[in-house]
Image (cartoon, rainbow, N blue to C red):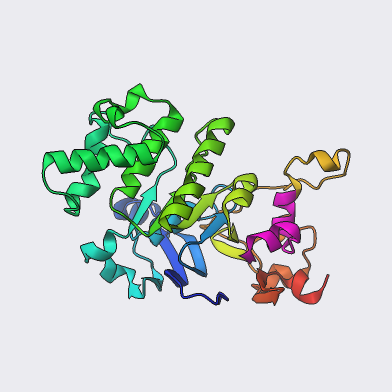
Amino acid sequence: MGDTMTSPALLDVAGITQRFDVSKPWLQRLIAGDPIRVLRAIDDVSFSIAPGTTLSLVGESGCGKSTMARLAVGLYTPSEGSIRFAGQDLSAARAQPALRRRMNMIFQDPYASLNPRWLVTDIVAEPIRQFRLAQGKAAIRARVGALLTQVGLTAADGDKYPHEFSGGQRQRISIARALASEPDFLVCDEPTSALDVSVQAQILNLMKDLQRRLGLTYLFISHNLAVVRHMSDRLGVMYLGRIVELGAAETILRTPRHPYTRLLLDAIPDLDHIGRARTPVGGEVPSPIAPPPGCSFHPRCPLANDRCRQEKPRYTVVDGVQIACHAVEEGR
């Protein structure tokens, strides 16, 4: 799948496929006569992100969003395809501290991603020490204080432990840690899903403000379309490891064309359309170990026909949006 963008990309993902061997141990398979089982978490995904913009990936649990997040920062090595960051292959970037420093990640759960035994100062200072961005305890402490202030905490909070903070404050600490290496690119893996709704808004506004002030580039992972609407310049809708619709967020949210995108948007409560009949997203996401033939969405799609059940859809471009759907291609 190609990705249409006019600006040079900071991150360029081309034909990425990620497979995981989920077989039983060799001896158990031999005794039981079981075959090797391979889970295809990502299936031929391509996209680009221009500097200073946000691309969001959205979809149900199990669609491959978090796997893509880890691939984007080099935590996984792709089975096929390539990921280029600032023009360099990511496998080479991992070996170069100057490039590795330019990307970081904000994890989903602020309760699990912070070491409970460390002071906040030590947590935020770890990237500073790792990349030698400041020398001496006083300089490092001053840098940590500035980072904590930048995310809405105080320098004195560095002398506390993570358990002394609320969920929203812990996520602010996670953001401060992510900013400590002075990155250009942040992968945000559902950074607000573990927080209360009112706190979510504060964290999202903070991230938007940091993006404007620091020129950050985001890959934003979410299952919440309301959050995505607030954050995104561009949007990719994922289903069973594949991007089924990709383009400008405003265009997709205003005129969704893929049946899956339309079903997701139809599930959002809307005060302007009280009483309107809605089509719920029926069924379950199929297993990525044994995906259905043809279009993977066809068992749940109200527009599916025999072609959908047999032939994998290619990408059609409509108004600059790429859609993988036979029904859209045929005008059904």
**The image quarter in which residue 151 lies:** top left
| Image height of 81 relative to 126, above or below | below
Where does the image place residue 254, in percent across and percent down from the top left?
74, 58
- So how many labels did they put on this image? 0
- Camera-side residue of 211 and 270: 211
Q: Can residue 94 be seen?
A: no
Q: Quadrant of the N terminus?
A: bottom right
| Image height of 172 relative to 77, above or below | above
Does 297 sit left or right of 270 as displayed?
Answer: left
Residue drawn 38% across the image and 50% down it: 105
Does 29 sit left or right of 208 as displayed?
Answer: left
- Camera-side residue of 129 and 147: 147
Based on the picture, tell me whether residue 254 belongs to the magenta stretch.
Answer: yes
| Image height of 172 relative to 162, above or below | below
Where does the image place residue 55, in percent across and percent down from the top left?
53, 60
Q: Quadrant of the C terminus?
A: bottom right
- Camera-side residue of 122 and 23: 122
Residue drawn 56% across the image and 38% down it: 201
Based on the picture, tell me whether residue 217 belongs to the magenta stretch.
Answer: no
What secondary structure predominates along the stretch shown in magenta? helix
Residue drawn 44% across the image and 29% down it: 167
Residue found farthest to the left: 136
Q: Can residue 142 be seen?
A: yes
Where does the image place residue 8, in percent across and percent down from the top left?
46, 75
Where does the image place residue 304, in percent across and percent down from the top left?
77, 64
Residue found farthest to the top: 164
Does 141 sit left or right of 269 as displayed?
Answer: left
Residue drawn 58% across the image and 33% down it: 197
Q: Which residues are magenta?
A: 245-265
